[in-house]
Image: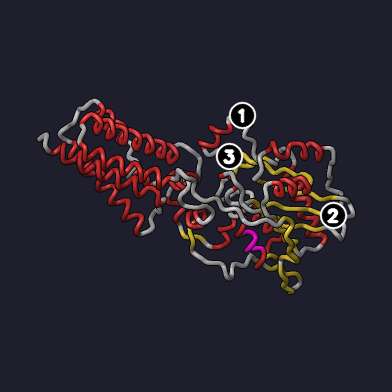
Amino acid sequence: MRSLTFIFFSFILMLSFSIKGQVQLSVYSEISIITADSGDNLYESFGHSALRLKDPILNLDLVYNYGVFDFDAPNFYSNFVKGRLLYKLVRYNFSYFLDGYKKDKRWIKQQVLNLTQPERQAFFLYLEQNATPQNATYLYDPFFDNCASKLTDITKDILKEKVEFVDEGIEKDLSFRELMNAQFHWNTWGSFGINLALGNKLDKRRNPIEYTYLPDYVYEIFKRSTITRDGKTEPLVKKEMLLSDFPSQHNGPSLFSPLLVFGLLLVIVFYISFKKEKIIIRFLDGTILMITGFIGAFLLFLWFFTNHSTTPNNFNILWAFPPNIYIGLLVFKNKLKPWFGLYFKILIGLIGLLFIFWLFKFQEYSYAILPILATLQVRYHIIQKSANKIH
């Protein structure tokens, strides 16, 4: 996915070239699926898909890119948080697209589709209509309507019953979370943050056609699929080629990975608990409770007050418990209450429930939360015992 600023210049160049519906593609034209490798940025972790139109007779070589967004658009970040992700289809010269990926050292694969001239013309008109200013912007969903899933949708819309998407040989019944986590190392802040923010809709078992929110699976599905005309069935892909050849990029954990940071926190908590310095312990407990409470409040906000399709039913709130904000304030003020024993017993039980959800795959979590859960259990047990002494 490319930021709008990367292709602005090429887009301006293309504005001078007005393609009308009466333009007929030649018999030498081609429609291709383009699949690109992942990149360094988090939003590039899944790779990219696009459509290419090439016609040497008309001197056309265009990419139709559904993955364009603008960081500088009004209210971009607030819309991002609210789940109103506005993306655009932009048409521009394919050479700019190819040069950008070569510069980033990302491989690009091309699959030329086995289409007749009328079928290629239908793709051309469909894409041109979608690229007009009034149609180009769409409400993006990273799992259900993105630059990759658009390609199977478009192909089905145009070819209808002639195309059959074949998933033979692709592992079935994987969840979106399993597919997502395979794209980047689990012990990274990006993986931790995404798994923290998204709920158990990601853990539903899916069929391979639904995997096509990922470009790699668009490539695999098209590779296996067929097209039928006049009773004759042929492969949907006529030929494949590698346009840019670089090793795949997979970013590993940084020096200060989530597991290391949270593991160090666990060690510090054990040490402070052993030293039994009351003022330090009170500050530690208040801080832990406030942070977990605010995280939980944010997860509830994503769950109930945004348009994200995958943030509801997020049971990370079993450990990031929103009422902890209030309890943390009481701890900071050293106002232990008689009912604290029951409250922290409930918190301990909620963490136990989280492990049950995890075991039965009702919702899976980032492994990086394990030292967080251990930290919470240590302090909750100690606070519960101290609260019981108040009686």
* Residue 55: mark in rendering: 2
46 left or right of 19?
left
Label 3: state its secondary structure.
strand
Q: How many marks?
A: 3
Q: Residue reaching furthest top?
A: 333
Q: Is residue 248 above or below residue 328?
A: below
Q: Which residue is mark 3?
A: 85
183 left or right of 327?
right
Residue 111 lies in quadrant: bottom right
Q: Is residue 155 above or below residue 141?
A: below
Who's the residue at 73% across and 36% down the image? 8
Q: Position of residue 258 (x, y in %)?
A: 42, 45
Who's the residue at 64% across and 49% down the image? 147
> What's the CA distance linking mark 2 and mark 1?
37 Å
Instruction: Specify few, some or many for label 1: CA neighbours under 10 Å numbering under 14, 14-19, or 20 or more.
Output: few
Marks 2 and 1 close (CB-CB < 8 Å): no
Label 2: state its secondary structure.
strand
Q: Which residues are magenta?
A: 218-222
Mark 2 or mark 3, which is nearer the start of the sequence?
Answer: 2
Label 1: state its secondary structure.
loop
Q: Position of residue 198 (x, y in %)?
A: 45, 46
Q: Which residue is mark 1?
A: 74
Mark 1 or mark 2, which is nearer the start of the sequence?
Answer: 2
Mark 1 or mark 3, which is nearer the start of the sequence?
Answer: 1
